[in-house]
Amino acid sequence: MIHPLSDVQTNDIGVNTYVWQYTIILGNAKIGSGCNINCHVFIENKVIIGDNVTIKPGVYVWDGITIENDVMIGPNVTFTNDKLPRSKNQNYIMEYTTVRNGASIGAGATILCGIEIGKYALIGAGALITKNVPDRALVIGSPAKIIGWVNEDGSRMTKSEEYYLDNFGERWSQVNDELVKT
């Protein structure tokens, strides 16, 4: 379903995807099946959105952003794609950002460019993401810090569960509701 008050220029939209009013999607964007693109969303050309993605109102998805399957983007999440933004910049270098399968980004979070958000990661509302977020990490704050780990359904891991961070080479455990490096 594409709402008649939206401006959808791409033909590359999967089945059972809903696009609501006042949303603009440019001609080269690729959007999967079963998505829910809420009102007041802007999606630029060099964007790939997987299947079963929800994008809440007030989100702008700029060139260079890939959102994989089963991702939740909360209202007013801010993405960037330029580390040195200047008006009419002739030397603009687009930075690429990827949000991996199953991740959720809370309302009002800001995602700096060139970042990878890991599978099933949970970004707290209002967080400022300045570096890669590992799979299943629960992050909050400005700048965001890891405060715990989550299961695929978003529930917090119990203290007996642990998760290994390949991309940092560190081992962390949840002990007595506290994250401890082991």
Image (spheres, rainbow, N blue to C red):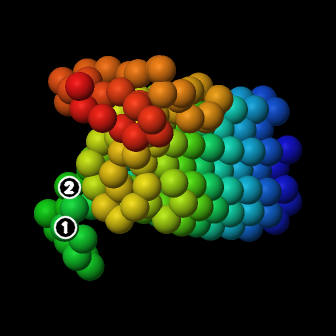
Residue at which label 2 appears: 93
Residue at which label 1 appears: 84
Proximity of marks 2 and 1: CB atoms separated by less than 8 Å: yes
Residue 47 place in picture, x, y as percent: 48, 44
Residue 62 shows up from this direction? no
Foreground residue among 5 and 166: 166
**Residue at (54% x, 66% y) in the render:** 108
**Residue at (68% x, 44% y) in the render:** 54
The numbered mark at residue 63 is none
Q: Is residue 20 above or below residue 120?
A: below
Q: Amino acid at mark 1?
A: Leu
Q: Please, what secondary structure does the residue beneath circle 1 have?
A: loop
Are there few (<14), some (14-19), or many (20+) residues within 10 Å of tag 2?
Answer: few
Tell which tag, 2 or 1, sits nearer the viewer: 1
Residue 110 shows up from this direction? yes
Q: Amino acid at mark 2?
A: Ile
Q: Please, what secondary structure does the residue beneath circle 2 have?
A: loop
